[in-house]
Image (tube, rainbow, N blue to C red):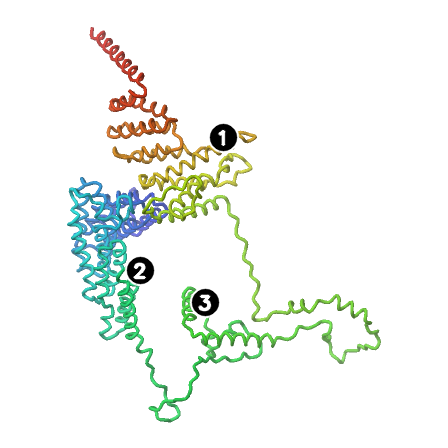
Amino acid sequence: MATAQLSVQDQIRQLEGARKLVLGNANYYTQVIQATLPIIGPSAQVEFRRWGADFLAEAFATPAIPSGQKETLSLVVLETLKLLVEDINQDVLVLRSIIQAAASIFPLALRWIINNSYDTHTWERMTAIKARILRIWDAAPSNVRIVCIKFAQRVVLAQTQSINPEPRRGDLLDISLLMIPPNHPILDAPKLEAEASGLLDRMLGVLQDNSSDALIVDATLNTLSILVRCRPATSNRILNTVLNFNPLKLANSPLTPKTKVLVKSMEKTTRMLLMHLSRRNPQNPQVGRMQQYVERLMRQRTEIFDEGSRKRAPPEQADGLDPKRQRTGTVSSHPQVEIIPLKPGPHSLADVFSFTSNEGLRNFNVGDNVPAALAAKISVTTIARIDPQLLDRAIQGVRDRLTALYEAQPEPINPETSPLDVEEDEDDYEPDYYAAEDTEQILNKLDSSPSDESRELDKPALGGLALPTFHLPPPPTLNPDQATKVGQGSITRVFSTMRTLEDPAVKKPKAGINRLAASTYDRDSWITVITRLATRANAGVDNVPEDDEDTKGCLPTVRLSDSIRERLFNYVLEDFRKRIEVAVSWLSEEWYNDEVQKRSASAAPFPHDVPVHYEKWALRLLDGFIPYLHSQDKVLTRFLSELPELNQAIFSRVKTLCRDPSLVNLALTSLYYLVMMRPPVRDLALDAIQDIWTDYEDARPMAAKYLQRWRPGFIEAAQQALSSNEGSVGTGATAVVT
């Protein structure tokens, strides 16, 4: 029996489950996007299209996906985006999210075309999407026009020149015209720059026309800051337009509540933009104009909105005097607050701090009616704006009340001097029948009684105002897995900090072997800290066998050092050509740690094997970046020449390059460099060249040239062996024919 088809709500619920999966682990984005594209296509129901458009916009905006992976995914989704955006009856929410995704994809598509000029179909799709968005810009609803402005900003950023002198070695996200070679067959840099200039004028047209649409104005102003910062060539045009814009123009019309909100929004956005630009670049020659504009804007805003609060009507005359005659008596400049003394009896802490006589306000429970965050915000704002003299007067009133309550407390009863709780009529006590205490008994009793100081300390606290002593509970004990999870969180924050640090513009010379590691707090220092945490932090601890009963349960299931190594591996492979120094530094630390651990294990009373990490991670790095090498790459030669130790396993990885005829020259050149510059591994490198000569026939001419100098006997013996083999094969074939 066929299963019943799921409802739309159930299918959306399943898609949300896939979304939660990728939010927890970004490695699944590729599989989920490829699996959901057929579901969210142009012919799908509007609920699926809305979910798919939001998901794509979120996926290409998240920093969790590496830039290279986003570039690959953009090629997969471009056709779907083109079909969705070209539908004239498309849902507004779908259109908005599609344009958001296109804004994130446009720079990635441009970089792909720069590096792969043969892929004309991808650029045609991106151009069609851009043309469609620019056509619907002016006639679309406000929420769609806002994302169109964001798309135009990304186009202007990508189609203008960057301030980075070497765009191919700088920030991967800063894509500009400088990356386009002069002879590119598809992209015409001057034409693209002219288009970007026209788009910028179109964006600024909203400000030049003094538009009263606050949403569009605020959206435009919010996109200008990054343009001024990253594209200085556009800063003068943008600043002149902003300084000529009047956000208070709408105040000339009747000020309705809606108009007030719109004017205040545009004024605040304009003011914050100029203040941000002046603080970020104090050397800008237009800082003076920006400061004068901000001061004039604030003054005009005060004149418009604070006029009603500054003019007060005269007080009503209740004594029958002429209302035109004002009282001219001296009025106290100090603020007054009425503080009523508390009535006798017990009082709570709220009674002490309450000055109002309104029972409704006194019985109002803030905790039950106002959220804690809102109450805290209101309290901070009120205290910041209150008159200092009024606050001092209120504090003094609270102190007076507390003093009065303390003095009104009854004195503690001394059991030695207090009368007995019996009626006088029934008291037949006759003191004359008992002998009075002598002096020695009185002195003994005084010596054994508590001192005056202890009595003062033991005074009972105020009944209604006493606060109990609060002790924080002890922190829970972390098990090894929890401690490892916390450590991984710290390492994640360190990596995120390291990614935000840029490479220095000028390479500093190495300080030598006597330098202090990680003393400058730059990216190199953080890399040193990370690599030593991976190699040295758990040195010696990893040697404990896992099947030891005494240590079972005391060690985490995932070692923190292995987690750091995995993150370092991924960090290097994200951009291995730029981060090859990180790889060499890390592997040098691994090799040093392995050697120290081996020496310590051999010198121990009970020698034992220690885990080695250098060879494992060196081979993983080679396997990771070898598939992406091209014939002009120098990174392999540099990597092999700077590694602290080379062995047969590493050379076997290099020999696999000769499977691709275009990489034979790269492999042999790298090996020959080791023969010339690293004598300790010369024999291993020559053995690898011999194996290449034997296994790969296409590489024999070049390999023979190197072997002829260093091992001429091998070439002669190998040629004789080949000749004899060919002769024997020919003889056998003749015999068979006969």
Position of residue 282 in the picture relative to residue 180 (left or right): right
| Secondary structure state at the residue bearing disc 2 | loop
| Secondary structure state at the residue bearing disc 3 | helix
Amino acid type for the residue under numbered disc 3: Gly
Frontmost of labels 1 and 3 is 1
Badge 1 density bin: few <14, some 14–19, many ≥20, Cα 10 Å: few
| Secondary structure state at the residue bearing disc 1 | loop
Disc 1 to disc 3, how far (Cα)? 64 Å
Q: Which numbered circle lies on residue 282?
A: 2
Q: Which quadrant is the C terminus positioned in?
A: top left
Q: Pointer 1: what residue?
A: 609
Amino acid type for the residue under numbered disc 2: Pro
Is residue 478 shown above or below 397? Answer: above
Q: Residue at x 37, y 28 (%)?
A: 649
Please provide percent x and percent y for residue 88: 16, 54
Q: Which numbered circle lies on residue 367?
A: 3
Of the pair 593 and 144, the residue shown nearer to us:
593
Is residue 485 shown above or below 266? Answer: above
Amino acid type for the residue under numbered disc 1: Asp
Please provide percent x and percent y for residue 718: 29, 16
Among numbered discs 2 and 1, the one appearing first in the sequence = 2
Of the pair 342 and 627, the residue shown nearer to us:
627
Disc 2 to disc 3, how far (Cα)? 46 Å
Please provide percent x and percent y for residue 149: 22, 57
Q: Residue at x 52, y 40 (%)?
A: 553
Q: Quadrant of residue 585?
A: top left
